[in-house]
């Protein structure tokens, strides 16, 4: 008995992938060959993107300040790029691997990423950033462990697992791109699929395990829970949180959470349930938490969770706080940086919208749908090549005008602190990737933002970099 949910009849399924820890060192070298290959996430063969033959790609295990030298060989027949979600590019933002700023790796060529996880700890992931490749694979977990002498606010877990979850489309990335180019949205059902793969997380009685859960999907927020077990949240994207016990967690696209799970129940197989949030129909998938000496499937109903409730999600997100007295990457307390005392000098309001441009489905910010220039912007900036982009080609606030295509670039002053309000008046969840910046999510709510909303900001213990949650009635402020 694995699921109370019927097999998925609609487009999406959810995947649970699991990896385990290996070695670490101050300089690490990787050679990654990116190829197409056959994968079976829904039990039937389909085309996927593999890294060194693996789907999902290999986990990167590192320690604060490690240098990661990653030679990526593109053996696909189209350009490819990898983005290192959450790894701050203090040395060279050209290594970011984001569409439009850096050069794609041409087919048959390689590029060596030089990264340093400087002053970082925690759980992150990497993913391909071009051409919807992410829909076909090419992603994997990144772990940054604390240096040996830095206190970690919980005991060493008996095991450490990367659990990647995401919505999964039966169609490959090329076919999905064609859907958008045909003027349709991805949330429309894409055909039928069967249940996702059950994956076993091995565990031993009375031991505590760390699960690093990341949502690597394209669109949907997911709720994650384990039959008969609670989860103690300990870390969110490099911040040690107040340790709070949850029976289920909403994981939005791009988010990574570390939880501790103690195997303190009778030795059986427990079902991990993942379901989509804010969607109709609700789609679900399962995996397994399997005790080493399991006597079989655990009886009883599977744990229920929220489906369309927005307030539930907002309240949970607000409950996730920084542990101000715990150490971060350095021995000093995380609360020693008083972000709430810093005055901001500018307010930017960004509103997302969707619509057709020349018959193709496009998504816009303040009415501009971004077009990547032929010359990457970092290259144009470095070599002072004119005509590639114009600073100020997007407004600081929503204009309500029709969507148009442009290479939008907004200027900002070095070292300033800016308030950014994200406004979502669409009836679909929207997630933002603020690449390479430190930010604090100080507020989120329904209704229209106004300066009075500042009275409700958390200026004390917000989590740095927790991606925001939004839907039609919400705005969010970072
Ligand atoms: C990458 O993998 C492909 C398929 O296995 C293989 O043909 C190719 O030689 C590999 N490239 C390198 C540089 O190892
Ligand atoms: C990467 O490209 C460089 C220069 O094009 C080449 O010398 C090198 O052998 C390539 N490395 C791999 C692993 O293919
Ligand atoms: C992706 O799917 C399309 C349509 O099903 C197919 O024609 C194409 O060959 C697939 N792409 C790859 C790289 O397998
Ligand atoms: C399980 O752990 C608890 C708390 O550490 C301990 O009291 C108990 O004896 C353990 N039980 C077994 C069977 O090891
Ligand atoms: C916060 O961190 C401190 C220092 O490690 C620890 O003693 C305390 O238990 C943590 N508090 C919570 C609520 O997690
Ligand atoms: C922020 O502005 C307030 C009011 O103008 C001022 O009193 C305070 O010193 C400023 N804080 C900083 C850190 O500049």
Image (cartoon, rainbow, N blue to C red):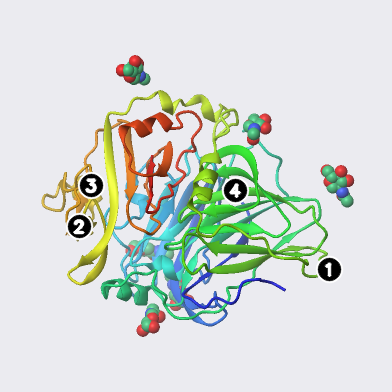
Residue that label 1 marks:
295
Residue labelled with disc 4:
258
Instruction: Indicate the position of residue 400 as horizontal and vertical percent values.
Output: 20, 51
* Residue that carries the numbered disc 2 in the rendered image: 375
Location of residue 174 with respect to 367 vertically, above or below:
below
Mark 2–mark 3 Cα distance, whole angstroms, equals 28 Å
Give x and y (percent) for residue 466. 47, 44
Disc number lying in front (2 or 4) = 4
Pick the front one: 326 or 295: 295
How far apart marks 2 and 1 lie (CA) works out to 60 Å
At 26% from the left and 64% from the top, the residue drawn is 362
Quarter of the image where one finds residue 49: bottom left
- Estimate the spatial distance between the alpha carbons at disc 1 and disc 3, rounded to whole Å: 58 Å
Quadrant containing ligand 1: bottom left
Residue 102 visible in the picture: no
- The residue that appears at 52% across and 59% down in the rendered structure is 222
From the top left corner, tell me how far across and down residue 475 is, in percent: 37, 45
| Quarter of the figure with the C terminus | top left
Q: Earlier in the sequence, mark 2 or mark 1?
A: 1
Name the side, left or right, on which 208 lies relative to 410: right
Report the label total.
4
Q: Residues within 10 Å of mark 2 (few under 14, many from 20)?
A: some
Q: Is residue 163 above or below residue 444?
A: below
- Frontmost of labels 2 and 1 is 1
The residue carrying pointer 3 sits among few (fewer than 14), some (14 to 19) or many (20 or more) residues within 10 Å by Cα, namely some
Q: Nearer the viewer, residue 455 or 91?
A: 455
Tell me which numbered mark, 1 or 4, is placed earlier along the sequence. Answer: 4
Q: Which element type, helix, strand or loop, lies under badge 3?
A: loop
Q: Secondary structure at mark 4?
A: strand
């Amino acid at each position: 008995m694995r699921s109370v949910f019927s097999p998925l009849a609609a487009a999406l399924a959810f995947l649970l992938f699991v990896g385990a820890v290996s070695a670490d060192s101050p300089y690490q070298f990787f050679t990654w060959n990116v190829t197409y290959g056959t994968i079976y996430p829904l039990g039937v063969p389909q085309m996927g993107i593999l890294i060194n033959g693996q789907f999902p790609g290999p986990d990167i295990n590192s320690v604060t300040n490690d240098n990661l030298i990653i030679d990526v060989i593109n053996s696909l027949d189209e350009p490819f790029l990898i983005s290192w979600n959450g790894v701050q590019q203090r040395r060279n933002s050209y290594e970011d691997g984001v569409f439009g700023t850096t050069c794609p790796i041409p087919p048959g060529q390689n590029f060596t990423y030089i990264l340093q996880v400087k002053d970082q700890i925690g759980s992150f992931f990497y993913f391909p950033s071009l051409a919807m490749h992410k829909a076909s694979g090419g992603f994997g977990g990144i772990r940054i462990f604390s240096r040996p002498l830095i206190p970690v606010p919980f005991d060493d877990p008996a095991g450490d697992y990367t659990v990647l979850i995401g919505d999964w489309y039966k169609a490959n990335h090329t076919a999905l791109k064609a859907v958008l180019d045909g003027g349709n949205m991805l949330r429309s059902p894409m055909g039928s699929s069967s249940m996702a793969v059950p994956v076993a997380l091995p565990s031993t009685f009375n031991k505590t395990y760390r699960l690093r859960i990341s949502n690597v999907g394209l669109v949907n927020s997911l709720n994650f829970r384990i039959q008969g077990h609670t989860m103690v949240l300990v870390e969110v994207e490099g911040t040690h949180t107040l340790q709070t016990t949850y029976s289920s967690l909403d994981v939005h696209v791009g988010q990574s959470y570390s939880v501790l799970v103690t195997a303190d129940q009778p030795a059986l197989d427990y079902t991990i349930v993942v379901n989509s949030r804010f969607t109709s129909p609700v789609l679900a998938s399962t995996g397994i938490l399997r005790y080493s000496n399991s006597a079989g499937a655990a009886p009883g109903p599977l744990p229920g969770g929220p489906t369309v409730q927005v307030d539930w999600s907002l309240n949970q997100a607000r409950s996730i706080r920084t542990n101000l007295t715990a150490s971060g990457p350095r021995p000093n307390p995380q609360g020693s940086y008083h972000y709430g005392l810093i005055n901001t000098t500018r307010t930017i309001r960004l509103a997302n919208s969707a619509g057709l441009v020349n018959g193709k489905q496009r998504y816009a910010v303040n009415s501009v749908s971004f077009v990547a220039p032929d010359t990457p912007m970092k290259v144009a900036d470095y070599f002072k090549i004119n005509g590639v982009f114009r600073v100020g080609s997007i407004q600081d606030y929503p204009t309500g005008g029709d969507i148009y295509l442009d290479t939008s670039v907004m200027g900002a002053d070095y070292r300033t602190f800016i308030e950014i309000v994200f406004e979502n008046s669409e009836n679909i969840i929207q997630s933002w990737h603020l690449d390479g910046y430190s930010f604090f999510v100080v507020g989120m709510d329904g209704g229209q933002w106004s300066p009075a909303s500042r009275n409700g900001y958390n200026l004390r213990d917000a989590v740095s970099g927790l991606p925001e949650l939004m839907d039609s009635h919400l705005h969010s402020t970072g």
